[in-house]
Amino acid sequence: MVAGTDLGRREVPLEQIVFDTFGAGDLTLAGADDRRVTELRDAIIPLNEPRYVSTGEAAPDLSDDDLVLGFVAADGSAWAHPHRILNFHEIVNAELGGQPIVVTFCPLCRSGAVYSRTVDLGAGPEVLDFGNTSALYQNDLVMYDRQTLSYWWQVRGRAVVGALTGVELRVLASSTTTWGRWRREHPDSSVLSFETGYRVDYGRDPFAGYRDAVNAGRTPFPVAPEFLTDDRLDPATPVVVAVASGSPWAVPLDTGGRRVVALPPVDDRAEIVVVVSGPDSVVFESPDPGGPGSGLRWEGDRLVDDRGNTWNLAGLAVDGPDAGIELAQFPSRNQLWFSAVAAFPAIEVVGRD
């Protein structure tokens, strides 16, 4: 036990969980004591009960090419989280559209994922609240839940040390895209406010040039060599990851151009369709044969289907016989390739061309 975390329950070596001590020397969970672990908790401050503003109020603080992590709640409400804020806070505990969720982002993996905070631990549903351990595993954020102080691997959404070891959070549909695109497709979106209550220069990018370093094999914290040397893609290639019927798939996002990628069928049925437009992507459940969205494809700069509809990247039919219909999104994560291989060793790559 250290600082309330049961180290006897774990599925990764404690020596491989490495704390960012912010210049105070090397420290792993195996060698940490109560005082240091407690001191480092939430040194990178998560946002709890965050403030959101309208797109109009957010506009002066954002440019069209700023990246946001977007989420559409079950009630249809849209929520945008600028990377410029997530770079410095990494975790946002919120209730959006009536759903208790946690928005997570690790700048060292460029990994954006939204998870449900509701888990069933056997005695009924429980809502967890998350903080930042200041530790990393495979160069990725390690969170903790405040209820049991278990450690959670962010890109996997899985508890790896502590009482909840082996429990996985339910990943929700989200997308990483530009502010310009998100605002056009979700004009009524709420946006995480830059008025966080903390004195941070959100205009500064501390990770400029970071991908070049990763592609050269240099990461700030340890990564198993096999994850950095998987030669199917460069280690810092951004990918969108979806798990269908237990099989993980990755679609690279920086090969340029537009394409629609239908993932190989699992159990004799196609599960999902990934639509890529340059660095943007969105993942949809496969449309019914002959129904709205069937035969989804790019024709020039228009996303069309076999029924004569035109779609936007939010999955809304904006023109045609089915105008107003929306395709259902499928849960996915955005991250760099090395972290996808680390989280899902059996992952396959599709849609490179």
Image (cartoon, helix red, strand yellow):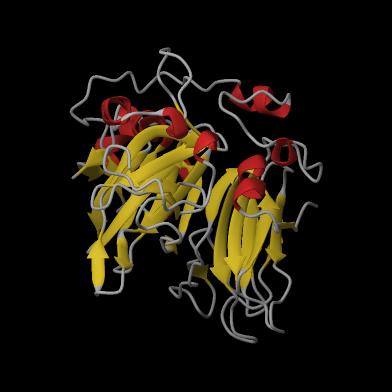
Residue at left 45%, top 24%?
27
Front-most of residues 107 and 221? 221
Residue 303 in percent (x, y) is at 63, 62
Residue 50 in percent (x, y) is at 21, 42
Front-most of residues 114 and 256? 114
Front-most of residues 85 and 217? 217
Q: Is residue 94 left or right of residue 140?
A: left
Residue 297 in percent (x, y) is at 69, 66
Vertical position of residue 159 compared to residue 261: above or below: above
Q: Is residue 196 left or right of residue 310?
A: left
Query: Please, which residue is most extreme toward the bottom here?
Result: 290
Is there any visible trace of residue 93 in the rendered image? yes
* Snapshot quadrant of residue 216: top right
Vertical position of residue 276 compared to residue 118: above or below: above
Residue 16 in percent (x, y) is at 55, 36
Residue at left 49%, top 67%?
329
Tally the marks. 0
Image quadrant where one finds the N terminus: top left
Is there any visible trace of residue 179 in the rendered image? no
Q: Is residue 57 left or right of residue 162?
A: left
Residue at left 57%, top 38%?
138
